[in-house]
Amino acid sequence: MPKRASAARILRAAYGVRSADWLGLLADDSQAQGTRQAWRLALWRADAAGEAGAGPQWLSPVLAARPGQSPAALREAVMNEALSALWQQGWRLQEAFAPDLH
């Protein structure tokens, strides 16, 4: 993992996201309040046949957003919230070093 890896890259590595899996933002209707929609980072794992599983695995806490918020800014904020949740759970990133060739 590079020293300056993005939140998305760290999350993909931490959760073992494969190419057949889906990682993205989903609205959590059960958490919406008034005009503010609740968004969460979700992971949908593909089964052996490449089909989506039964339901999403929530990777971030709820982030409330107003209508018209920039999708890129919202995605970045939710990714950062998911990364913070990893740190709070005690997950740590260990930098891999090349073996000493001497």
Image (spheres, helix red, strand yellow):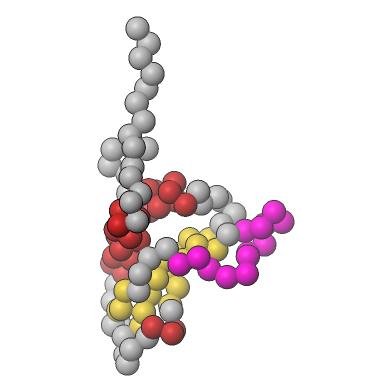
User: Residue 20 is drawn in which quadrant?
Assistant: bottom right
Question: Where 10 falls versus 50 (above or below)?
Answer: above
Q: Position of residue 38 (x, y in %)?
A: 36, 79
Q: Quadrant of the C terminus?
A: top left
Residue at horizontal 31 percent and vertical 69 percent from the top = 74
Residue 23 is inside the magenta segment: no
User: Residue 94 is drawn in which quadrant?
Assistant: top left
Residue at horizontal 32 percent and vertical 92 percent from the top = 34
User: Residue 51 is drawn in which quadrant?
Assistant: bottom right
Q: Quadrant of the N terminus?
A: top left
In the figure, is residue 46 to the left or right of 6?
A: right
Q: Is residue 59 visible?
A: yes
Question: Where 8 falls versus 60 (above or below)?
Answer: above
Q: Residue furthest right?
A: 49
Q: Position of residue 37 (x, y in %)?
A: 35, 83
Magenta stretch, main secondary structure, is loop
Question: Where 51 falls versus 15 (above or below)?
Answer: below
In the figure, is residue 90 to the left or right of 22?
A: left
Residue at horizontal 69 percent and vertical 54 percent from the top = 48
In the figure, is residue 15 to the left or right of 94?
A: right
Q: Which range of residues does the magenta coloring cover?
A: 46-58
Q: Is residue 71 visible?
A: no
Q: Position of residue 26 (x, y in %)?
A: 45, 73
Residue 56 is inside the magenta segment: yes
Q: Residue furthest top?
A: 102
Residue at horizontal 62 percent and vertical 69 percent from the top = 54
Question: Where 36 falls versus 60 (above or below)?
Answer: below
Q: Residue furthest front?
A: 90
Q: Residue furthest bottom?
A: 34
